Image (cartoon, grey):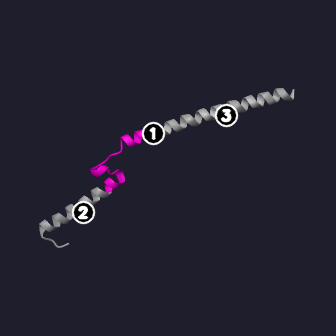
Amino acid sequence: MNSEYLLIAATMLTGVVILAHAGLRGWQGWLQLKTRELEMHRPEIEGGAATGAARIEIADLKERIRKLEAIAAGVDI
């Protein structure tokens, strides 16, 4: 009788391990898919800069334009 319970417990444990392994592989695959999707839709500008760098570069360009407009208007900065 003990051997029957041991066999049932071992079988159930094996089943749980197999399901956990399959779930983990599926989760990793899903994460890889989402990572690829994010990389495909990443906006880039000159030199391959990513989103954060793009915002910094745009802010720098706006500052340059403001300075050039001030120079054109004859205002000292």
Q: Determine the secondary structure under disc 1.
A: helix
Quarter of the image with the C terminus is: bottom left
Q: Earlier in the sequence, mark 1 or mark 2?
A: 1
Residue 38 spot, x, y in % from top left: 40, 42
Nearer to us of marks 2 and 3 is 3
- The residue indicated by pointer 2 is 63
Relative to 46, residue 60 above or below: below
Relative to 48, residue 62 above or below: below
Residue 51 spot, x, y in % from top left: 35, 51
Residue type for callout 3: Val
- The residue indicated by pointer 3 is 17
Q: Earlier in the sequence, mark 3 or mark 1?
A: 3
Q: Mark on residue 5?
A: none
- The residue indicated by pointer 1 is 34
Residue type for callout 1: Lys
Q: With 70 as the anchor, is 6 left or right in this view? A: right
Main secondary structure of the magenta stretch: helix
Q: Determine the secondary structure under disc 3.
A: helix
Residue 17 spot, x, y in % from top left: 67, 34
Nearer to us of marks 1 and 2 is 1
Residue type for callout 2: Glu
Q: CA distance from mark 1 to mark 2?
A: 36 Å
Q: CA distance from mark 3 to mark 1?
A: 26 Å
